[in-house]
Amino acid sequence: MSDIHHRGVSDSVALPGVAEALSRVARSLESEPDQQRTLAAIVTGVIAMVAGAQCAGITLVDKGVPSTVAPSNPLVTQVNALQYKTKQGPCVDAAARQGTFRTGDLALETQRWPRFVPAVTGLGVRSMLAWGLFTVGTTYGSLNVYSTEPDAFDQEAALVGELFASHAAVALAGVRRQTELHAALGTRDLIATAKGILIARHRCDPEKAFRMLAEASQNTNMKLVDVAAWLVKDAAGPN
């Protein structure tokens, strides 16, 4: 099968029930409070929606290093580990190229992935389908489904999964923004507490207290937030 590089689904493509299913899944993803639960919900959803999918998982790429998260089956982790080792395979390509990659019989895909295919043959996976997980300006990795049957995924499965992956990427982006916001608020509160301690101890104004924290950070080669955390812990005394 050739790669699928479209970026949307034509209005003429009729996929009964897909819009309703996507809306339902999108609402469930929005309610997940953290990244791990969001990823698990994505995996559960894609298995339910994509015909032929026996198991699924997500490849996340952090600073160029891929890892497998929320695998529905240990086989997913095994297959992905071989892709990361050989730097070949549908998951690797989908993450790197923000596209959709579908196999027919994986055992016959030696031209596209000559190192990966011989390595994975003994694990029993015969079909794979992977979609890039990305939003404008940010690539997270790929969403991947697997089957022990050859030619398990047709064009419609690829299209349905692409729609789902788009929703999933937006949900993942939202969770990460929330996490970053909470972390930023926590850092701000920690620094404010540390400043309050210095103001009380040295009877100085807030600006001087912040300069003291900044100078301590520079002199100790520690992050300012770590200096603040140490000061707060020290002020609290032994537990």
Image (cartoon, rainbow, N blue to C red):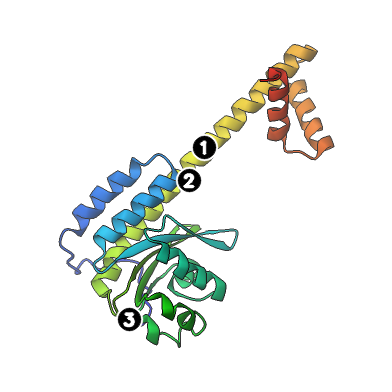
Task: Say which mark, if any, is on residue 181.
Answer: 1
Q: Are marks 3 and 1 in contact (CB under 8 Å)?
A: no
Q: Amino acid at mark 1?
A: Leu
Give the vertical position of 239 relative to 2 (above or below).
Answer: above
Which percent across, then down, holds residue 21? 22, 54
Residue located at (40% from left, 45% from top): 37
Front residue of 32 and 182: 32
What's under tag 2, amino acid-wise?
Answer: Arg
Residue displayed at 42% across by 80% down: 121
The quarter of the picture where the N terminus appears is bottom left
214 up-or-down from 110: above or below: above
Q: Quadrant of residue 225?
A: top right
* Residue lying at 41% horizontally and 65% vertically, measured from the top left: 76
Relative to 197, is 230 above or below? Answer: below
Q: Do the numbered discs 2 and 3 sit on residues whose CB atoms are within 8 Å?
A: no
Q: Which residue is mark 2?
A: 176
- Residue at the farthest front position: 122
Query: Could you say which disc has been placed on residue 104 in the image?
Result: 3
